[in-house]
Image (spheres, rainbow, N blue to C red):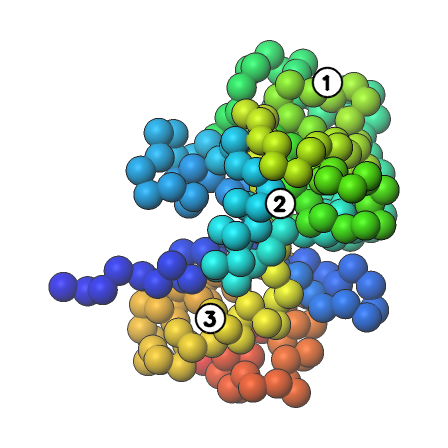
Amino acid sequence: MQAPPSPALKTLGTLVLLPAVNVDSPMLLMGRYEVTQNEFDSFPENGELPVTMIPIEAAQTWAKERGFRLPTLQEWQFAAQDGAGVVYQTKGSLDGKANVMELGAHEALPVGVFERGATRFGLFDMMGNVWEWVAPEEKNGSLPGQVLACGGSFARSGEDLSTTTTRFLENGEAADDLGFRVCADAEAWLLGWVLPLWIQSKKGSEDRSSIIASFALWDSTLRNELAKNLKEGDFPPDFLDALSYLKE
């Protein structure tokens, strides 16, 4: 019987490659979707719904165990704005693109429903569905003991919602319209979680095919840029060729 795929392989297919926020920071991997109940819990009630009622420390712990972290406020807003600094929305522009109050669902919906609302790089539900935790930082403007979430939810009107909208919460607080998505430095996560699987598997194997297929979902220009950046690291040529979506 064939062994089940590594959790890292399954996770790789749910990540989006993003450009660096600035010249001194690394390229990013970010969850294509909000973390789901299926990912968070072995026995979920509604697997593809975003997991909610999770305090920020629990979200951070879960992410860290998988090599991830919460995005910073700057990273979250950068991702939501397609890396272009565009502060949207205008009035009514979320119609049919996000699970906000005007939709009338009055509850979270399965992740990935609103294809029209996806960002250019392929992130879903950055606006609406559930608020998303961002990493605590002193420069966020929060008071001691306060933490931030971004993006709005099904209970928030889309009329005044933008990529810069934030919600202040108390540390330890949880809500039924509050979840999270994960983030990681691309080079570090690939080195620690994907490269070992590549080295252990053979050319043409299912594991390698799965890795290549996941890379193919990413923006081709960004893939090539990342492969170029990794040439000075510990990545073998065949891995870099696959990242550039060249044949092994």
- Residue furthest toward the left? 1
Residue type indicated by callout 2:
Leu
Tell me: residue 55, above or below residue 157: below
Residue type indicated by callout 3:
Val
Q: How packed is label 2: few (under 14 Cα within 10 Å), some, or many (20 or more)? A: many
Separation (CA) of disc 3 from disc 1: 40 Å
Q: Name the residue tied to disc 1.
A: 157
Q: Quadrant of residue 156?
A: top right
The N terminus - image quarter = bottom left
Decide which of tag 2 and tag 3 comes sooner along the chain.
2
Q: Which mark is residue 123?
A: 2
Tell me: residue 206, above or below residue 178: below
Separation (CA) of disc 2 from disc 3: 21 Å
Note whether residue 247 is visible: no
Mark 2 or 3: the one toward you = 3
Residue 221: % across, % down:
68, 65
Secondary structure found at label 2: loop
Q: Name the residue tied to disc 3.
A: 194
User: Is residue 22 shown left or right of residue 43?
Assistant: right
